[in-house]
Image (cartoon, rainbow, N blue to C red):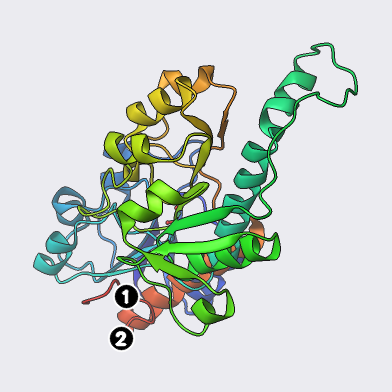
Amino acid sequence: MARICITDAVPEDGIASLLEAGHEVVRWTGDQAPTRAELLEHVKGAEGVLSVLSDGVDEEFLAAAGPQLKVVANVAAGFNNIDLDACRAHNVVPTTTPGVLFDATADTAFALLLMVTRRFGEAERLVRAHKPWQYRTTFMLGHSIEGKTIGLIGAGQIGAAMAKRCKAFGMTIRYAEEHPMREPVRSELDAEGLPLDELVATSDVVSLHCPLTPETHHILNAARLASMKQGAYVINTARGACIDEAALVESLRSGHLAGAGLDVYENEPTIDPGLYELENAVLLPHLGSANVETRTAMTELASSNVLAVLAGKPAPTPVAGF
Ligand code: GLV
């Protein structure tokens, strides 16, 4: 029996396998996510940890857990919250949950696309504010996405799932060739790879689906935002720091960009105050994969990773290189 600590609330069905295996499962039962000090105390003595992406899994975290720790299973596709060098130094295997959340995240990206291009976020706010309105032929016109070009930065599982949705709605699919799309989906969608700068400068919508790495930090910087077509849109369900948020606010405020649909922010849960003021920004609170089925599947996969490593077997979905 091993001690397995879970750092925040997760769907209970997702940890059934840990309980069935007879492990000591230590849940986090607070109403709020733990503070840093509470987190470090909570993981003490764990052999396995189910972590979430707001946990900084770094030297301090691994040292606090102790030398018996073998696996940190992030209940997330991303792992930018994990210090991989520190994991290597502590002989800890970090794992993620790819392959189970791409449809849910693409649904969120596509919902943001429709909300921002058709002004549904703005319209909902208007109704809820009890502002007067009446049906008129020119009232609150948005733009159609049919016939427009979407430029994907990141065309892995989530990007490809977004591309399928966009194709079904009549969009032309392009992607940054630095982050290529696999076959056969590329051919099926008739998707074209372009150099990143050309992609950004020629797309009607730019949608981010890349991991956050040193290379993708501010991949949409002020210069690239300025190079976008007048009236273009930005969608971000990847990581906030892939966009220079302050520069995005300026592009939206000036009217250069027609709108942005955002699920993620540079300094979550803090959001650039300028974004709140902008009617052409649709703002979600990092809900990318947030449905019961997907979060349960993510937790089940994280649990399988913990069980495998504790049994001395290879983790099913380790971070590449582990
Ligand atoms: C969510 O953002 C995830 O990485 O799963």
Q: Would you say the residues marked 1 and 2 are in contact, meaning their CB atoms lie under 8 Å apart? A: yes
* Number of other residues with Cα within 10 Å of mark 1, as a class: few under 14, some 14 to 19, many 20 or more: many
Mark 1 sits near ligand 1, with its Cβ under 8 Å away: no
Which label number is shown at residue 202? none
Q: What residue type is labelled 1?
A: Pro
Specify the quadrant of the image occupied by residue 229.
top left
Marks counted in the figure total 2
Residue designated by label 2: 314
69 lies above or below 53: below
Residue designated by label 1: 318
Q: Residue at position x 13%, y 66% from top?
A: 90
Looking at the rendered image, the quarter that the N terminus falls into is bottom left
* Residue 322 at x, y percent in the picture: 22, 77
| Viewer-proximal residue among 112 and 143 | 143
Query: Please, which residue is most extreme toward the right here?
Result: 135
**Left or right: where 108 falls relative to 301:** right
Of tags 1 and 2, the one toward the viewer is 1
**Left or right: where 220 falls relative to 167:** left
| Viewer-proximal residue among 161 and 256 | 256
23 lies above or below 207: below
Q: Is mark 2 on a helix, strand or loop?
A: loop
| Viewer-proximal residue among 68 and 159 | 159
Specify the quadrant of the image occupied by residue 196.
bottom left
Q: Residue at position x 53%, y 79% from top?
A: 185
Q: What residue type is labelled 2?
A: Pro
